[in-house]
Image: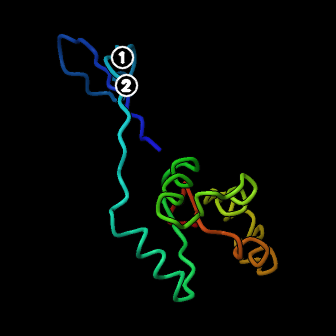
Amino acid sequence: ALRTICLAMKDTAEAVEDVTEAEKDLIMIGLVGIEDPVRAEVPDAIQDCARAGIVVRMVTGDNMTTAAAIAKKCGIIPQNASAEQVRRAVIDGKAFREAVTDENGKLNQAAFDLIWPDLRVMGRSTPLD
């Protein structure tokens, strides 16, 4: 799960103050993929928690694909999980919020109870989730 960064430039004779204007007509000079590796002690800590009966859940701002890949590397989601198991284990923060709250923002406990048993990772999370 790489984070993709596009490097671009704009050749100008003077400083551009307006961000919208500065982001127009850029010249791509590179595309980089970086990985933020899982610290070596994390998978063992996750296994220790599992042996103690603790279910570890991960909340992150990462996109869903990256979040699921990190969770697999950590052992939060089993490496051999089926696509269906991953689908049930990973949810987008906004989708979760919409699924478990009513139109007034109040928790719908029945909807929450359907989701949380399989939930292991919430991606694209915000403070509202």
Q: Mark 1 touching mark 2, by CB under 8 A?
A: yes
Task: Give the labeled residue for mark 2.
Answer: 31
Q: Position of residue 39 (x, y in %)?
A: 33, 62
Q: Position of residue 53 (x, y in %)?
A: 57, 87
Q: Position of residue 67 (x, y in %)?
A: 52, 54
The foreground one among 127 and 88 is 88
SS of the residue at dot 2? strand
Q: Residue at x 34, y 69 (%)?
A: 41
Q: Residues within 10 Å of mark 2 (few under 14, many from 20)?
A: few
The foreground one among 63 and 21 is 63
SS of the residue at dot 1? strand
Give the quadrant of residue 38: bottom left
Q: Residue at x 38, y 34 (%)?
A: 33
Task: Give the labeled residue for mark 1.
Answer: 28
Camera-side mark, 1 or 2: 2
Question: Which amino acid is tagged 2?
Answer: Leu
Q: Is residue 84 left or right of residue 26?
A: right
Give the quadrant of residue 40: bottom left
Q: Residues within 10 Å of mark 1 (few under 14, many from 20)?
A: few
Q: Is residue 68 above or below residue 107?
A: above
Q: Residue at x 54, y 67 (%)?
A: 76
Q: Position of residue 14 (x, y in %)?
A: 18, 15
Q: Is residue 108 above or below residue 4?
A: below
Q: Residue at x 54, y 58 (%)?
A: 72
Label 1 to label 2: alpha-carbon separation: 8 Å
